[in-house]
Amino acid sequence: MEFAGKLPDSAELRRRCRVVALLDALVEGRALARDDIGTVYQPNWRSGDDLVKYQNGGGDEWSIVFSATDGVFLRGFDHESDLSTYNEDDYWPGLVGDLPERFRSDLKNPDLYGYYDGAPQMTVCVWRGPADVAWRHGNPERTQWGYHGDGGEHLFDPLIDWHASKELDWLYPAQGHVVPESAVQQVMDRKPLTDELIRAFHPNPDITALRAVATQIGY
């Protein structure tokens, strides 16, 4: 799977998740609730585990579990993907592969979803154990058109194409407000959140709340 080969290692992926979550909060000018559109980082969501969740409001989403004992599990769902089996009983054949049981059980945890009704909502499935030297994945069967299909890997572009200009393309600032690329780069470099830097993202931000978010997620 080409996508798995593009992912950074577990520690770098977690760092990028923190940055992307903070960027989404900064352009909103406030702390995001866990079910808001955008990326939300939930530290210690479960004892020893962090959860990061993204949803675009149009039916596409992803979630990543960072487990202190079991490694990392990455799940994505593109509702228009050829691999979507939302109206069926199980995931696309071969998609789940030998996903560890700890993470397999999380597939039924509503916390991982923007909306969960028990239907299969996964078109991307990748994981990495604590001792693994590379990301692992199943081997999805080919679609009826003879190819493996697109599982919605593009939803993870903000975590892979790690450039300020690309991150800026994914942000939705307040109407009429222009976010400088240099401000995005400063956050990607984990520079201190000065008042000036925070205001570069929103005309009327809740500075106290945003600094609290940065502290909470480990920015």
Image (cartoon, grey):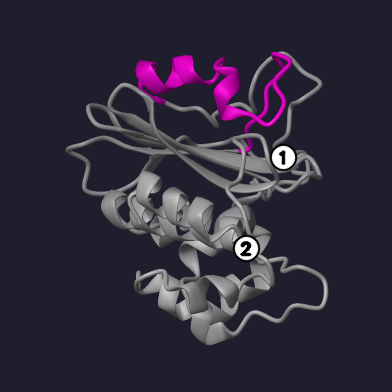
Residue, disc 2:
205
Q: Secondary structure at mark 2?
A: loop
Q: Is label 1 or label 2 in front?
A: 2
Q: Which mark is residue 143?
A: 1
Q: Nearer the viewer, residue 26 or 126?
A: 26
The magenta segment: 98-123
Under mark 1, the amino acid is Thr
Work out which residue is located at the far left of the displayed protein and give it. Answer: 131
Q: Residue at horizontal 82%, vertical 71%?
A: 175
Q: Measured along the vertical axis of the image, is residue 154 above or below residue 89? A: below
Q: Residue at horizontal 61%, vertical 45%?
A: 32
Q: Which mark is residue 48?
A: none
Count residues near mark 1 (Cα–Cα under 10 Å), then give few for <14, some for 14-19, many for 20+.
few
Task: Residue 15 in the image: state x and y as whole percent.
Answer: 35, 56
Q: Residue at horizontal 50%, vertical 79%?
A: 196
Q: Quadrant of residue 190?
A: bottom left
Q: Nearer the viewer, residue 56 or 1?
A: 56
Relative placement, left or right, of 178 versus 53 is right
